[in-house]
Image (tube, helix red, strand yellow):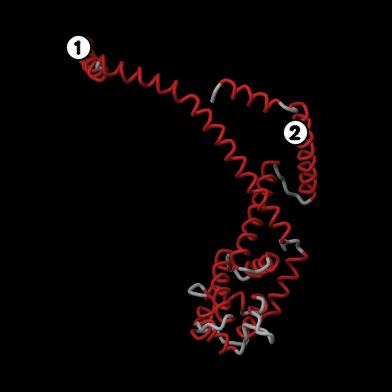
Amino acid sequence: MSQSQIANLNVMLGINTAQFAAGLASAQGSLGAFGESLKKFAAMAGVTLSFAAVTASIKSTVDHMDELGKAAQKIGIPVEDLSKLEYAAKLSDVSLEDLTGTLAKFSKNIAEVGAGGQNDAGKALQALGISATDAQGQLRPTVDIMSDIADEFASMQDGAGKTAIAIALFGKSGAEMIPLLNGGSEAIKEAADQARVFGAVVSQEAAAAAEHFNDNLTKLQEAASGIQTQIATALLPQLNNLTDILVTLAERFNLSEQAANGFEELLKDSAIFAATTY
């Protein structure tokens, strides 16, 4: 980085410094007020919260919303539906990882069936009397098919047969879905309604906003890394000159041998001192 580039960087960073400082102070004030409001609410609830804990909790929530949004895209279902199913899955001790993994496999299976293909999931649906397509031959929504499966599972006795059907539908981890499905479609709907009441349903807009926020954080981290790279690049010639000099000195004066000899002399002197003292 040349002196002119450094000067330009300083000028660039100095633009609207007062405005930036005022904006930062305003943001800090808003965050502080928000933190105080949360603390008052927590005090009424008998809970003690620190501002750091609050911000960490918010970031964790943003990360989860981002994760749900990306998972919904991979599976091919609306994020609202996935967040409702996640709540129902939690009540059945089914993890989000198991839920998304099995739903991804299920979506792939029913897509093949809807396109006229044959697979184990199609055979399982046929055995249950469930169609993957509607009257117009279009693939039905994943959640609707799952609701029909849940009603069938609710009336079936647990055992090897039900497990085999679950694996055929959802893949090798399909058995993990049985507790979620055993309550029937009504239990899934009740859980979805409760998730909405609790504010646990993540909208498409919220998931997109969370993804945008995390993307910006990644960009800022990369920008900081880029500045460090440019600084290191500018300093490397001087650092190389310095290390070249040190290497030359080490080779010319045989520092390693001198150090070894000096250490040997030190041991001898220590031994002599110890012998004469004691």
Report the label total: 2
**Would you identify the image quadrant in which residue 99 lies?**
bottom right
Question: Which residue appears at 73% of the width and 66% of the height?
Answer: 195
Work out how far the residue at label 2 is from the one at label 1, CA to CA, in angstroms.
68 Å
**Would you identify the image quadrant in which residue 69 lies?**
bottom right
Question: Few, some or many C-alpha atoms within 10 Å of disc 2 (few <14, some 14-19, many ≥20)?
Answer: few
Screen quadrant of the N terminus: top right
Q: Quick one: 205 or 62, which is closer to the camera?
A: 205
The image position of residue 246, as x and y in percent, is 35, 18
Q: Earlier in the sequence, mark 2 or mark 1?
A: 2
**Would you identify the image quadrant in which residue 252 lies?**
top left
Find residue 272 and name its label.
1
Screen quadrant of the C terminus: top left
Describe residue 212's horizontal placement relative to residue 225 as left or right.
right
The image position of residue 144, as x and y in percent, is 67, 78
Q: Quick one: 101 or 186, which is closer to the camera?
A: 101
Q: Which residue is mark 2?
A: 24
Question: Which residue appears at 59% of the width and 75% of the height?
Answer: 179
The image position of residue 9, as x and y in percent, is 63, 26
Q: Quick one: 126 or 239, which is closer to the camera?
A: 239
Question: Few, some or many C-alpha atoms within 10 Å of disc 1 (few <14, some 14-19, many ≥20)?
Answer: few
The image position of residue 122, as x and y in percent, is 54, 84
Identify which amino acid the numbered label 2 is placed on.
Leu
Identify which amino acid the numbered label 1 is placed on.
Ile
Q: Nearer the viewer, mark 2 or mark 1?
A: 2
- Callout 1: helix, strand or loop? helix
- Callout 2: helix, strand or loop? helix
Question: Which residue appears at 54% of the width and 32% of the height?
Answer: 228
